Amino acid sequence: MEGGTLLQVQDLVLGCRGRSYPLVGTVSFGLRAGEIFGLVGESGCGKSLTGLACLALFPSGVKPLSGRVIFRDTDLLSLPEEKRRKFRGRHIGLIFQEPLNALNPVFTVGHQVEEVLELHRGLSGEKARRETVRLFSEVGLPDPELRLRNYPHELSGGMRQRVMIAMALAGDPDLLVADEPTTALDVTVQAQILELFLELRARRGLSILFISHDLAVIREVADRVAVMYAGEIVEEAPREELFSSPLHPYTRALLAAFPRLGTRKLEVLPGQVPPPGTWPRGCRFAPRCPEKIPLCAEKHPELKEIRPHHRVRCLRV
Ligand SMILES: Nc1ncnc2c1ncn2[C@@H]1O[C@H](COP(=O)(O)OP(=O)(O)OP(=O)(O)O)[C@@H](O)[C@H]1O
Ligand SMILES: [Mg+2]
C-alpha cells in the first residue's frame, strides 16, 4: 500500500441478489490520511453504494461480488459482520444527506451521542455528558449544554446536520464518509457546514470521502476528485487539475454546466446515465458522448494514468 494511504478500494464490484449484472464496478481508488476526496457524478452512477462499501455496509440485497476494501491493514470485506460493526463508528464515521432519517425521533440528541460514546469509547454518565457538550461545541452548535435535551424535530436542518457530525465524531474515527451532507440545506447553511468539514480536517487530521452530485460543493472542499459514471470512475485528478484541465468528455460536460449549478440538478447533457444492466459493451458514456469515434462502441476503455496523479478512462485521450 502507498505510504500514507488510509483506505484503499481495490477492483470493487457490487451486485444485487437475483440479478446477473453488477450495480457498481469496477471501482478502485485510494484515500490518503488527512485528505478530502470528492466523489462526483449524476444520480444513479453508484456514489452512495461505493461510499457505503467503504464501511462494508450494504443495503438489503446488495453484496460485494469481488474486490477489496482495505482500511490500514484490515480487509473490511473479509471481516465477520460483528467485527465490521465495531469498526464502523470507531474508525470510520458515516454522515447522510438527511439527518432526520438517521436520528431517532424519540430520543434526545444528547442521549443519542452519549450512546455512541458508551459503545465505542466506554464513556457513561457525567463523562459522556461532558464529552457530548464538548463535541457539540466543536461542531459549532450554539448553547451546547441546552442542546443535550433537544429532540431532533426541535432543531433546524443545519443544527441536525451538526448533531449528525458530532455523532459521527463520537467514536473518534480517522475517516468520515459524508454522502451528500449539504444537499438538503439552503445555500448559506451549506457554506457553513462545508467550512466545518474543512476545520475538522485541519484540527483532527481527518480523512473525508465527500460524495456530492454538485461540482460547486466538491470544488470548495476536495483535495482530489473522482468523477463516476455508470458504476465506474471515469476520471480522477487533484482538484486544481481536474477543474483546469479536465480530460474526459463527461467531466468536461459537467464543467460546462458549472455556472448554471445551484439548481441542484445536473441538466448538462441530453440523455441519462444508463441504469445497471443496460451498460453498453464499449465505453459506457459513448451513447451520450459528443466526441465518440466508432471504436468507443466496441472497446471498454481502461482507467489510465496519463499524467502524474491524473487518471482517465477514455480511448481518445
Ligand atoms: N438496494 C438496492 N437494490 C438494487 N439496486 C440498487 C440498490 N441501491 C441502489 N441501487 C441501484 O444502484 C445504482 C447506484 O445507486 P447509488 O445510490 O449508489 O447512486 P448514486 O450515485 O448515489 O445516486 P444519487 O445521486 O441519486 O444518490 C442505481 O442504479 C440504483 O438504482
Ligand atoms: Mg446517492
Image (cartoon, rainbow, N blue to C red):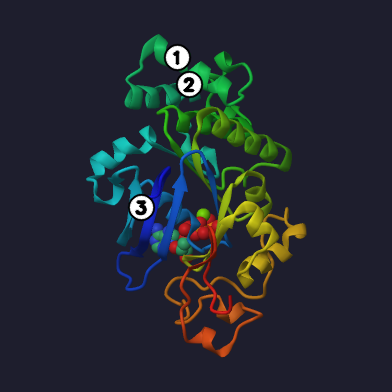
Q: Residue at x 40, y 47 (%)?
A: 7
CA distance for labels 3 and 1: 32 Å
Work out how far the residue at label 1 is from the one at label 2, CA to CA, in angstroms.
8 Å
The label on residue 112 is none
Q: Are marks 3 and 1 in contact (CB under 8 Å)?
A: no
Q: Which residue is mark 1?
A: 129
CB of mark 2 near ligand 2 (< 8 Å): no
Q: Earlier in the sequence, mark 2 or mark 3?
A: 3
Residue 181 screen position, x and y as percent = 57, 43
| Residue, disc 3 | 58
Whole-number angstrom distance, CA of label 2 to CA of label 3: 28 Å
Do the residues under discs 2 and 3 have CB atoms within 8 angstroms? no
Relative to 10, is 83 above or below? above
Disc ID at residue 110: 2
Q: Answer above or below: position of 268 versus 61.
A: below
Three-letter code, disc 1:
Arg
Position of residue 110 measured from the top left corner of the image (x, y, whole percent): 48, 21
How many C-alpha atoms fall within 10 Å of the one at disc 2: few (<14), some, or many (≥20)? many
Q: Answer yes or no: do the residues labelled 1 and 2 have beta carbons within 8 Å? A: yes
Q: Please tell me how crowded label 1 is: few (under 14), some (14-19), or many (20+) other residues with Cα within 10 Å.
A: some
**Label 3 CB-ligand 1 distance < 8 A:** no
The x and y percentages for residue 191 are 69, 39
263, above or below 7, in the image: below
User: In the orientation shown, which residue stands out farthest toward the bottom?
Assistant: 294
At a point 30% along the width and 43% down the height, the residue shown is 73
